[in-house]
Amino acid sequence: MGLRASESTRTQIALAAVVAVALLAGCTALESIGGHPQGDPASDRLGWESGYWYDDAVAVTPADGYNASEREAVVARTMARVERIRELEFNETVPVEVISRQQYLENRSSGGNGSATYERWNDQVWESLFVVGERSSYSNSSEETLGQTIQGYYSPGKDAIVLVSDSETPTIDRTTLAHELVHALQDQHFGFGAEGETQDQQLANRGVTEGDARYVDVLYDNRCGSQWSCIPKPSSDGGGGGSGGSDYNRGLFLTIYTPYAAGSQFVDGVRSDGGWSAVDDLYDDRPDSTEQLIHPEKYPDEEPVNVSVADRSGGEWRRFDHDPVADTVGEASIYAMLVHNGAVNPENRYGYQSTPSAGWAGDSVVPYTNGSAGGYVWTSVWDTEKDAKQFHQAYLDVLNEHDARNPRGNVYVVPEDSQFGDAFRVVRNGDTVRVVNAPTVDQLSEVHSRTG
């Protein structure tokens, strides 16, 4: 639930699906006209689409953008190449449209929003991760993040791909196109299915969808120059932001990027062990948690534990009228919180592994409101008491990063001038860590009393 902004579930998958596929370096060789010695096959087959074999050249002039006929040629050949790599046949041609980043942003801003109750509930979940503060919202932060980083998306409802160009003339990023064509292929063969109710389940589910597409677009790009002649990469200084933009929430980006980085590594391992047929099987047996994406040895046997939070609220404080009342953020989001707030500094930022976030067993975040302000109770369970201690200390490091003072015992207060300016009660009991948040110290026991 925590990743939804305003679109339907499937549209949000598509929009999140392309936040960073243009990070690869690429060759800049121009194309030339050429034919394939085999000619057109008698019937459709892997590696051939709409008159183009996977290793054909295409007649294009990238310097002045791609006109309609050039785009058709590039799309057809890219479909043939995706088939060749992924060993799946397209059932039908996929329409591709190129729009400017300005047009994309205008389309996004005109979309409808979710309910006010959901938005406030969801904002508390992201606030618990110290990713989206009280002066912003998840909706605004995701708009800024996707607006700056998105390169294209596949729309399941229209069975079509939209590429976002930073240039005044229509350009195509070859890895973005390959990535989105994999999504079209997935939709034609497997469908996207249910996403899951929690943030962690959604990220884990997308780890198959995005991991598969990311893995294929990397394989695709690796063949450019050495095995295949490829269209050049668009310039990164097109002026529209793109993946080089700086005005976006990097903690949110790190969370959204989980399915691409951890998912592609997961898919790589599955394919190495069982081939593409084993990857196909993942669509019917997806990971249950981001922990399984990050630590493939835990798939499929180590399922997350169910964590319940007793309602001990009083006074004017109550849970939101939202179903479900709780969200599960999971290991990947906890990792993003720790990195984003300087509690851990891993050598590989996109490896999603750190000592304080490993050992996660389950968690539950329950947002609360008194009608005007928000609070939450976040209970996390860990594999061992040692794991809980390590997370507990890292969480205190996050509070210290925001200049928290410690007036007494396990109570901490972040200054009001911070976007996370609140009171916190942080308690570890064995393998369990509980965080209670409220605007003031006095309200902590109204959100969640110490005893039932």
Image: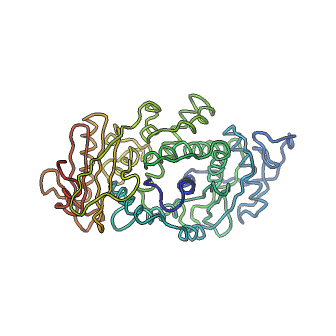
Q: Nearer the viewer, residue 368 or 58?
A: 368
Q: Which residue occupies the extreme left position in the image?
A: 408
Vertical arrangement, residue 24 with respect to residue 421, above or below: above
Q: Nearer the viewer, residue 70 or 303?
A: 303
Residue occupying the point 64% across, 47% down: 187
User: In x, y percent, where is residue 445?
Assistant: 18, 56
User: In x, y percent, where is residue 124?
Assistant: 34, 59
User: In x, y percent, where is residue 130?
Assistant: 33, 57
Q: Quadrant of residue 209?
A: top right
Question: Left or right of 359: which side holds 144?
Answer: right
Q: Quadrant of residue 234?
A: bottom right
Q: Nearer the viewer, residue 87 or 316?
A: 316
Vertical arrangement, residue 348 with respect to residue 127, above or below: above
User: In x, y percent, where is residue 80?
Assistant: 74, 45
Residue occupying the point 63% across, 46% down: 221
Q: How is the image coloured?
A: rainbow
Q: Nearer the viewer, residue 211 or 121?
A: 121
Question: Left or right of 34: which side holds 422?
Answer: left
Residue occupying the point 71% across, 60% down: 62
Residue occupying the point 79% across, 39% down: 45
